[in-house]
Amino acid sequence: MILEHIHGLQTLKIPRVQPHTPVPGSVVIGSVTRLSPLQALISITVVDDVPLPAGEEFTGVIRTQDVRATEKDRVKIGDCFRGGDVVRTQVVSSGSLHEKRE
């Protein structure tokens, strides 16, 4: 934040942070849009604490093997997520991220 004095008045300038594409290691927030037995599709709306502009969400996938470190073969996506759930997670691979163009 920058505090400036213009014509005797104080003005607070807050620099605008530009959103970026999620990359491995990014922390994202989104909501579950679709479920299948092997994966949950996520509409990503926040990347590294920066909200994305409306209509510029990304789509991510949480696979059963990404849910936990042990007993991966026993994970049931329907027991872990419901449509509309809000999730905060870290990107492990960018191979399944796609920008929506609507």
Image (tube, rainbow, N blue to C red):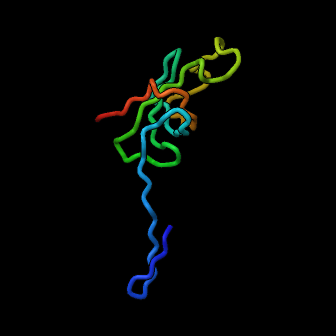
Q: Residue at x 36, y 46 (%)?
A: 54
* Residue that protrudes farthest toward the top in the picture: 73
Q: Nearer the viewer, residue 78 or 18?
A: 18
Tell me: 24 left or right of 20.
right
Quadrant the C terminus occupies? top left
Residue 2 is situated, as x and y percent measured from the top left of the image, at 48, 70
Residue 35 visible in the shown view: yes
Q: Where 3 falls versus 102 (above or below)?
A: below
Residue 88 is situated, as x and y percent measured from the top left of the image, at 57, 38
* Residue that protrudes farthest toward the right in the picture: 70
Tell me: 89 left or right of 31.
right
Q: Residue at x 61, y 21 (%)?
A: 79
Q: Where 46 falls versus 7 (above or below)?
A: above
Residue 44 is situated, as x and y percent measured from the top left of the image, at 46, 37
Residue 60 is situated, as x and y percent measured from the top left of the image, at 46, 29
* Residue that protrudes farthest toward the bottom in the picture: 8
Q: Residue at x 51, y 26 (%)?
A: 93
Q: Where 25 falls versus 17 (above or below)?
A: above
Q: Nearer the viewer, residue 63 or 21?
A: 21
Q: Nearer the viewer, residue 45 or 69?
A: 69
Tell me: 36 left or right of 77.
left
Query: Number of labelled discs?
Result: 0
Residue 87 visible in the shown view: no
Q: Nearer the viewer, residue 84 or 67?
A: 67
